[in-house]
């Protein structure tokens, strides 16, 4: 059966209730634009005959590269207003040839069911209330695992919970967005003033400021009947709270997790999500500390993610922030990698770029798989 891959990667923004107070943050329109173009990452999940729907049509060089790498899908731009999400456009504009195909969204948003129905796609999509519930850090914290933190719903509770160095999190924040490290009374006072000015409903998670040693994630899928399918564990490379890549876990980490019963803990989270009505991909973010403590459940992502994609492919995936200049930068990158014998095709080690339009000037996001130990720096220097 043909599978249709689609969906917006800024899912948390669509799950977040409108009446919820927001932590202080600086908006980045450029980062928002690059997040929209992350939908091209789904190309490597496509099999022969599958279709990838994106909000922007990828350049021909990207489609050709994916085909050469063994992911020969049709890449189609969804018609409609580019300011709207893919889901909103699919709910209003017909795309020929989709009826009867299986819907495989990046995440189930409020408009995903309507979009799938309008296009005649099939598949058991979860109820939106269950999706929103399970993706909330409030729900994860309520599971009661060690180190997961405290839910606060007032300034008084925030002040009490943040008396020691901590991280204050938005329940729908993601990859460093919606997190604030509070290490001083002055910093806490700044957060309180911001929340008091807004006057909106407060719901935040306060977690201890753990001294991180290793970040990792368990990746699973919850089937239509609530059955659990394990994909495995990926070690996560973070820059602060921002995602920078996924790799195989070290044998030492796996032995420690076995001794601690981590697999059973992660599966218990998936079963709780299934009881809540969620179906689909699920990742459990976890960490160890420099003192040897295991924090088994920091938060849950009930959606796809770059880490889940890396796990499904069984590859090392990296995200590099790179300077981008001039038109056709992606095509020039692919040509430069090929000339340097670093393009990972035909079984040879190297680098495979996973998205084209995230490489937008002046600074782009280069998502790529890595096999072997290729040196990417000379290629990037050549392009600047």
Image (spheres, rainbow, N blue to C red):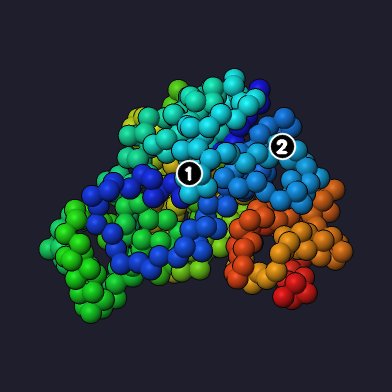
Which residue appears farthest toward the top when viewing the image? 100
The x and y percentages for residue 13 are 39, 50
Q: Earlier in the sequence, mark 2 or mark 1?
A: 2
Disc 2 and disc 1 in contact, CB within 8 angstroms: no
Q: Quadrant of the C terminus?
A: bottom right
Residue 311 visible to the viewer: no
Is residue 17 left or right of 196 when viewed as pictured?
A: right
Q: Residue at x 30, y 67 (%)?
A: 24
Q: Which residue is mark 1?
A: 85
Residue 120 visible to the viewer: yes
Mark 2 vs mark 1: give the one in front.
Answer: 1
**Between 14 and 285, which is closer to the camera in this rendering?**
14
Q: Which residue is mark 2?
A: 73
Q: Which label number is shown at residue 20?
A: none
The x and y percentages for residue 227 are 47, 27
In this view, 65 is above or below 121: below
Quote the CA–CA distance across marks 2 and 1: 21 Å
Q: Residue at x 57, y 39 (%)?
A: 79
Give the structural element (helix, strand or loop) at label 1.
loop
Circle 2 Cα neighbour tier, 10 Å, few/some/many (<14 / 14–19 / ≥20): many
Residue 162 location, quadrant: bottom left
The x and y percentages for residue 18 are 27, 48
Is residue 101 left or right of 296 when viewed as pictured?
A: right
Q: Residue at x 67, y 55 (%)?
A: 356
The x and y percentages for residue 233 are 55, 48
Q: Residue at x 47, y 45 (%)?
A: 84
Circle 1 Cα neighbour tier, 10 Å, few/some/many (<14 / 14–19 / ≥20): many
Which residue appears farthest toward the left when viewing the image? 156
Q: Quadrant of the N terminus?
A: top right
């Amino acid at each position: 059966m043909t599978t249709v891959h689609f969906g917006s990667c800024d899912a948390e923004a669509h799950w977040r209730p409108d009446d919820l107070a927001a932590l202080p943050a600086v908006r980045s329109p450029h980062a928002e634009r690059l997040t929209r173009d992350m939908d091209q990452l789904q190309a490597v999940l496509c099999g022969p005959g599958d279709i990838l729907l994106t909000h922007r049509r990828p350049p021909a060089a990207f489609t050709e590269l994916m085909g050469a790498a063994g992911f020969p899908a049709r890449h189609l731009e969804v018609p409609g207003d580019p300011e709207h999400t893919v889901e909103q456009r699919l709910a209003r504009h017909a795309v020929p040839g989709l009826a009867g195909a299986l819907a495989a969204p990046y995440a189930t948003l409020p408009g995903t069911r309507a979009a799938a129905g309008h296009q005649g796609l099939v598949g058991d999509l979860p109820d939106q209330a269950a999706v929103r519930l399970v993706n909330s850090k409030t729900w994860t914290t309520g599971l009661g695992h060690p180190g997961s933190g405290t839910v606060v719903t007032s300034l008084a509770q925030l002040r009490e919970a943040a008396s020691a160095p901590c991280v204050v999190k938005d329940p729908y924040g993601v990859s460093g967005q919606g997190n604030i490290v509070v290490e001083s009374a002055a910093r806490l006072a700044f957060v309180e003033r911001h929340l008091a000015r807004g006057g909106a409903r407060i719901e935040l998670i306060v977690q201890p400021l753990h001294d991180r040693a290793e970040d990792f994630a368990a990746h699973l899928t919850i089937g239509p009947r609530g059955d659990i399918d394990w994909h495995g564990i990926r070690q996560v490379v973070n820059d602060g709270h921002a995602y920078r890549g996924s790799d195989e876990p070290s044998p030492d980490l796996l032995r420690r997790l076995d001794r601690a019963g981590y697999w059973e803990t992660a599966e218990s989270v998936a079963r709780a999500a299934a009881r809540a009505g969620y179906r689909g991909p699920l990742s459990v973010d976890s960490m160890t500390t420099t003192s040897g403590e295991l924090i088994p459940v920091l938060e849950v992502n009930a959606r796809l993610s770059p880490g889940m994609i890396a796990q499904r492919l069984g590859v090392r995936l990296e995200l590099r922030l790179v300077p981008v200049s001039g038109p056709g930068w992606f095509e020039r990158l692919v040509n430069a990698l090929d000339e340097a014998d670093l393009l990972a095709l035909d079984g040879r080690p190297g680098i495979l770029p996973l998205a084209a339009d995230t490489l937008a000037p002046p600074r782009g996001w280069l998502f790529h798989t890595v096999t072997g130990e290729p040196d990417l720096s000379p290629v990037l220097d050549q392009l600047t």
